[in-house]
Image: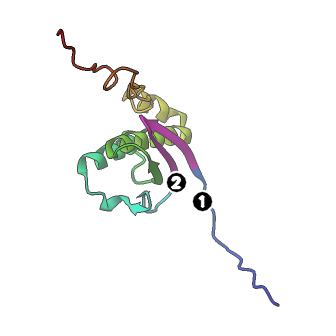
């Protein structure tokens, strides 16, 4: 039996990897130098419907001036759409700051390297929700 071995001759591009979180969302980002198509969860970034989210994700590239010279791939999971967008921005900002140290000060001045620490408060016993208590009856 002959087993054909498939050799891949793909050139592996160097990338800058980073992870970002927001609430329960987790995003991993890879920023490549050069020309290419940016994707989010396997879908092209140019087909992104929400213009507000699109402008938020582009912000780190616009501030550092790397919009034309770099592209990215992002994978997000967990949480809601806006939370995933915020986690993606944090991941992209961290990856861009690894490219050049001068980008780090620009991104931190605009608050893109900070993680938002707010989380959902846990439910306590004898409570309906985290702070809401059952209705009180005097008689």
Range of residues picked out in magenta:
16-30
Q: Residue furthest right?
A: 1
Label 2: how many residues lie within 10 Å, few (<14), some (14-19) or many (20+)? some
Of the 4 image quadrants, the one containing the C terminus is top left
By secondary structure, the bulk of the magenta-drawn segment is best described as strand
> How many angstroms separate mark 2 from mark 1 (CA)?
8 Å
Disc 2: which residue: 33
For the residues labelled 2 and 1, say whether their Cβ atoms are less than 8 Å apart.
yes
Residue 75, horizontal then vertical, whole percent: 47, 52
Where on the picture, by quarter, is residue 126? top left
Disc 1: which residue: 13
Q: Residue furthest left?
A: 139
State the residue at coordinates (57%, 52%): 15
User: Does 128 appear in magenta?
Assistant: no
State the residue at coordinates (39%, 42%): 79
Of the 4 image quadrants, the one containing the N terminus is bottom right
Where on the picture, by quarter, is residue 5? bottom right
């Amino acid at each position: 039996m002959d087993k054909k071995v498939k050799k891949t001759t793909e050139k592996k591009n160097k990338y800058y990897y980073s992870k970002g979180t927001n609430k329960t969302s987790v995003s991993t980002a890879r920023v490549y130098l050069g020309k290419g198509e940016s994707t989010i969860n396997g879908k092209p970034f140019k087909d992104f419907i929400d213009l507000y989210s699109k402008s938020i994700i582009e912000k780190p590239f616009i501030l550092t001036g790397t919009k034309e010279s770099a592209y990215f791939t992002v994978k997000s999971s967990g949480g809601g759409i806006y939370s995933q967008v915020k986690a993606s921005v944090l991941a992209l900002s961290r990856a861009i700051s690894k490219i050049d140290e001068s980008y780090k000060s620009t991104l931190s001045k605009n608050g893109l390297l900070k993680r938002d620490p707010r989380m959902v408060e846990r439910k306590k016993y004898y409570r309906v929700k985290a702070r809401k208590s059952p209705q009180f009856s005097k008689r």
